[in-house]
Image: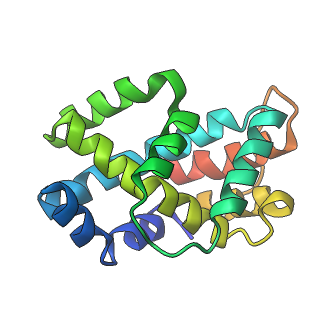
Amino acid sequence: MDLANIISSLTGNNMIGEISKKFNIDPNKIISVIKAAIPKFLARMQQNASTAAGASALAQALGNHAGQGFNINIEDGMKILGKIFGNNLNSTISGLSSQTNTTNDQVSNILASIAPNLLSILGKNGGNVVGNLGNLLGGLLGGGAASSNTGSVGGKLLGGLLGKLIKK
């Protein structure tokens, strides 16, 4: 699985139509936001997983969402966004809004809609996420472990995966 596969998984199903219908957003804008947002999601996951606690929390979130069917759960999505982006959420939304010629509300709704589904995709492709976080992320980004100053195995493995994914 690579960045293109993740984006395809999020855009190649009925989710775009559901988001469009629910929030009255042009499907092309939804796709544009998703393509711009996924690298940001992965970069923040990489940053969050640079500590043992962050890697553990990410592994748990991926495990909790693994294999869930595609659905729009705004409440869960907003919680995920808050955990992934933290205090940077508003600036991330504003940046994506400017980049994709959409409103902040549209970006927020799109991100909240896709967040649980992104975790589901990543979790499903990781199997036993806690034990295979490095393999999941390494495979996604096209490589193995990257260096990390934290010494966290999960952070190193996630860093290697996400670093390669973002470069693609």
In the image shown, does 139 or 93 lie closer to the viewer? 93
Write the residue at 21% across / 61% down. Answer: 22
Q: Is residue 125 above or below residue 58?
A: below
Instruction: Mark yes or no: residue 92 visible.
Output: yes
Tell me which colouring the rendered structure shows.
Answer: rainbow
How far across and down, in percent of the image, does residue 123 sit?
65, 65
Quadrant of the rendering where the N terminus is positioned: bottom right
Closest to the observer, 94 or 64: 64
Q: Using the rendered image of the protein, determine whether residue 167 is visible from the camera's viewpoint.
A: no
Pick whichever, 5 or 16, lies toward us: 16
- Given residues 31 and 162, the one toward you in this image is 31
- Point out residue 128 in the picture as x, y percentages from the top left corner: 80, 68
Q: Position of residue 78 (x, y in %)?
A: 45, 42
Residue 89's place in the image compared with 115, above or below, is above
Percent across and percent down for residue 16 are: 26, 68
Tally of marks: 0
Q: In this view, which residue lies farthest toward the front?
A: 75
The quarter of the displayed image where residue 135 is located: bottom right
User: For the point 39% across and 48% down, which residue is it?
Assistant: 112
Q: In screen coordinates, is 139 left or right of 96?
A: right
Residue at x 53% of width, y 27% of height: 86
Point 52% across, 41% down: residue: 79
**Would residue 45 appear left or right of 28 to someone viewing this image?**
right
